[in-house]
Image (spheres, rainbow, N blue to C red):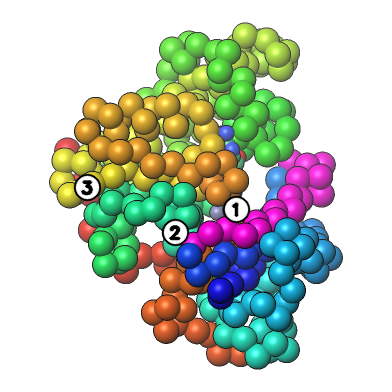
Amino acid sequence: MKYVLGIETSCDDTSVAIVDEGGRVCANVVSSQVEEHAPFGGVVPELASRAHLSNLPRVMDKALADACLSLDRISAVAVTQGPGLIGSLLVGISFAKALAFARELPLIPVNHIRGHVRALALEFDPVPRPALALIVSGGHTHLFRWQPDDAIVLLTKTRDDAAGEAFDKLAKMLDLGFPGGPLVDRLAAEGDPRAFEFSMPRFRDGSADYSFSGLKTAAAMHLKRDPHAFRDLSGQRVKDLCASFQAAVVKHLLQRVKQALKREPAEALLLGGGVACNSGLRRAFEALAKQAGLPAMMTSPVLSTDNAAMIAAEGWHLWRAGVTADWDLNPNVSLKAYDEVRFLANE
Ligand code: KG4
Ligand code: ZN
């Protein structure tokens, strides 16, 4: 049996995973840095790199122990090349290079966003294709068509904030804590999604981009109008604002999927990335798929947020296709996740 060891350090999670040639996840260890960054209300890049550096050796040891394997059973090392934070990527890549060089193993460069797409294949086998894949995280918001030949076609992406970033910013405005997405999700469950008005983003140029900065500004306006009403973090106004904001984000995300369904051939609807943990989005996504008569495939929470299992799985795929990196591999913070672009336009 062959095993690929994956390393993910693109943002604030240090993760090492081992996936075997049958696509089974033998270990997937994720060490979160929430405690380091929480006092600052967001990810501090310098702290993230330093934490990756000290976490990686023990995270790898834990992954090997969980998989009951020693290092000499590993056949290849896959590592996230980008996109992500430059310092964080650099730590992961240096670690992966040293490991692969010392053990004389192939080094495989992985695109983080393609990893989020590949995570779906770890849980659903086979994933019917072509499929529409909505990948929503703290740094990215992309709608893709995933082709039977594995090519990824970009249909639309955000022109400003990512959806997860919008959740995090709302949480910051309300002083809820970090990371904000899960906190907003929890409060939204007890709020009224019709309490506050949010209009859908529209562009004069007819583009069907995603955009979340307008929703964030609208939330700031609601807050400014009556700041006292939002002081009590367990109060109804806070819950109502979270519910209304979440409903607007979900509506906007699915609005583009509906548009894509009119134009694109699809055998399944796929949802991945950290925001795929959002309960409102999962419910609405499932309902949309049902309406369209397609299966809804969504990664479970551990494979939605950043993890190295998806990097090892994508690494397997690349290795089989003959892709390996040289020892001069560098991070690429703006690495593109797609092979082709076919933008949607607003009706
Ligand atoms: O994929 P991910 O772990 O990291 C990036 O590649 O960015 O996504 C993290 C993002 C954060 O913005 C976090 O707030 C958001 O996913 N998130 C959520 C939920 N859980 C995580 N957003 C909304 N609702 C959630 N339940
Ligand atoms: Zn991610």
Type of the residue with mark 1 = Asp
Mark before the other along the chain sequence, 3 or 1: 3
Q: Which residue is mark 1?
A: 306
Tell which of 41 and 283 is nearer to you: 283
Q: Horizontal and vertical percent for residue 308?
A: 61, 61
State whether residue 153 is above or below residue 243: below
Q: Is residue 91 left or right of residue 316?
A: right
Which numbered tag is attached to residue 106? none
Q: Which residue is mark 2?
A: 118
Tell me the CA gap for discs 2 and 3. 17 Å
Type of the residue with mark 2 = Arg
Q: Which residues are magenta?
A: 23-41
Q: Is residue 157 visible?
A: no
Verify whether residue 317 appears in magenta.
no
Mark before the other along the chain sequence, 2 or 1: 2
Tell me the CA gap for discs 3 and 1. 26 Å
Dividing the picture into quarters, in which one does residue 38 lie? top right
Dividing the picture into quarters, in which one does residue 253 lie? top left
Q: Secondary structure at mark 3?
A: loop
**At 54% from the left edge and 37% from the top edge, which residue is drawn?**
277
Q: Horizontal and vertical percent for residue 293?
A: 22, 33
Q: Which residue is mark 3?
A: 266
Q: Is mark 1 within 8 Å of ligand 1?
A: yes
State whether residue 257 is above or below residue 251: below
